[in-house]
Image (cartoon, rainbow, N blue to C red):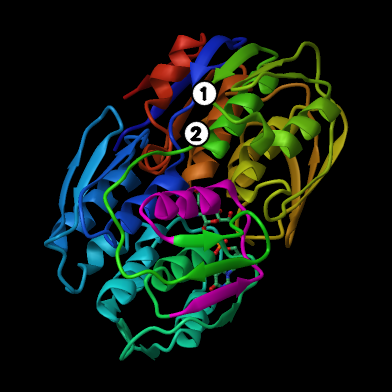
Amino acid sequence: MDQFVINGGRRLTGCVSVSGAKNAGLPVMAAAALCDDVCIIDNLPYVKDIIIMADLLRYMGAEVSLSPNGRAVINPRGLKNVIPPEDMVAKMRASTYLMGILLGRFNEACVPPPGGCSIGARPIDQHLRGFEALGARVEEGAFLTLRASKLVGSNVYLEASVGATINIILAAVKAEGVTVIHGCAKEPHVVDVANFLNNMGASIRGAGTDTIRIRGVQTLRSTSYTIIPDQIETGTWMIMAAATKGDIVIENCIPPHMEVVSAKLRKTGAEVIEGDDFLRVRASGRLNATNIRTMVYPGFPTDLQQPMSAMLTCANGRSIITETIYEQRYRHLEEMRRMGAKVQVEDRVAFVDGVERLYGRTVEASDLRAGAALIVAGLMAEGTTTISGVKYIDRGYERIEDKLTSVGADIKRI
Ligand code: EPZ
């Protein structure tokens, strides 16, 4: 079991380059299985979840080569309608996309329940309602079985779920007629999946707005596609720069995706400079407290609430954090209490009273972004912090210890 050992108290300075977006790469790889030919996908982060998706597609008969430089070549001609293995599906949330692609390709899917980070209830009722609207019958048991004689475009009503929006797109892209999805998630990764499918010849309009309109097509052709930079990794670096009173140039990112995070960091007193494809974040002196309320895009992302609230434990004053998306995303703060953080959690609200300093301790990451938050804590703390649960961090951050070392952190994997 790997651990990170961090000697804190160092300013982070220099340049880091952001990897491709995990939460775009996963559904794009799945979407390649709907194609009738080979697709090349570049700028995939070489992280655990992406490797699992490649393994799942291989298990189902696709030929997939995935290289550490971020290129996947996917030939889905041999894809068969098999039940994916329970242990692999249980490893990540993105295995829900197998429902969309199997249904879209074979009009039938039988899948075990998906896994994913343990951050609260993660129902899939919206996905199932959407599939039903397209004509699928759903049977829920130990496995989920979806069957349609054929999929027919329809009106689908969602409540801004990222996964459900993408899954319905995957199922509808080759369905007969027109599907209109109302109440779509607008996250950049939803737009990336739609762009990839449109490059293959799909007809998807409106991605990035509340309403997406899909005209079903019969075939999808070979394409090459480059995944967008990771919005959450970008935000994590922004927070790490501010938290360590550092000065980091974050290269290969999309600054407009970060507007709400930039605005919040500026409120704390950090300076954020925007370029075309880079951000520079620097801070000096103690940061000010600020309030955070997580919202769907373009609001403050739940995935950055954890690193941000970790940073605010050392800010001047009281910050009130309201987590509206997942009810169990404060476990990092419970751990940080042992480092000296003053935190009170009441249901979905955390009251964080900033302290002068944190002290290095042994702490455990309970999920991916909790892991990122504890790294922020370790970087700020006086002394040595040992973080276990690194397997969660490896699911979503590519070479994080190498990148951290390159900007001056003292971090080792043991
Ligand atoms: C995606 O999860 C991301 N995962 C999550 O990132 C991210 O936290 C989340 O979107 C929100 O941005 C992937 O892309 C693989 P949702 P997803 O469906 O699609 C409720 C990370 O750290 N809901 O948008 O599962 C749900 O309970 C991970 O990288 C229903 O009620 O999230 C939640 O409260 C963690 N019924 C809200 O909607 C449904 O059928 C948003 O969930 C579906 C969702």
Asked whether, in this view, residue 307 is left or right of residue 166, the answer is right
The amino acid type, in three-letter code, at marker 2 is Pro
Marker disc for residue 316 = none
Count every numbered label the image shows and give the total.
Answer: 2
- Within 10 Å of disc 1 (Cα), the crowding (few <14, some 14-19, many 20+) is some
- Asked whether 194 falls inside the magenta stretch, the response is yes
In magenta stretch: residue 258: no
Graded by Cα atoms within 10 Å as few (under 14), some (14 to 19) or many (20 or more), the crowding at tag 2 reads: many
Quadrant containing ligand 1 reads bottom right
Taking the spot 32% from the left edge, 33% from the top edge, the residue there is 2
Task: From the image, tell me which residue sits under label 2.
Answer: 229
Using the image as rendered, state which of residue 388 and residue 279 is in the foreground.
279
Would residue 373 appear left or right of 202 to someone viewing this image?
Answer: right
Residue 253 x/y as whole percent = 56, 27
Q: Is mark 1 within 8 Å of ligand 1?
A: no
Q: Nearer the viewer, residue 399 or 135?
A: 135
Give the residue number, with chain letter if any, for mark 1. Answer: 252
Coordinates of residue 112 in the picture (x, y in percent):
30, 74
Residue closest to the eye, 82 or 209 = 209
Residue appearing at x 56%, y 25% in the figure: 378
Residue 193 rendering spot, x and y as whole percentages:
46, 52
User: Hey, which residue is sitting farthest right in the picture?
Assistant: 317
Quarter of the image with the C terminus is: top left
Q: Could you tell me which residue is drawn at 50 percent across and 17 percent down?
A: 16
Left or right of 42 on screen, residue 283: right
Q: Which residues are drawn in magenta?
A: 177-202
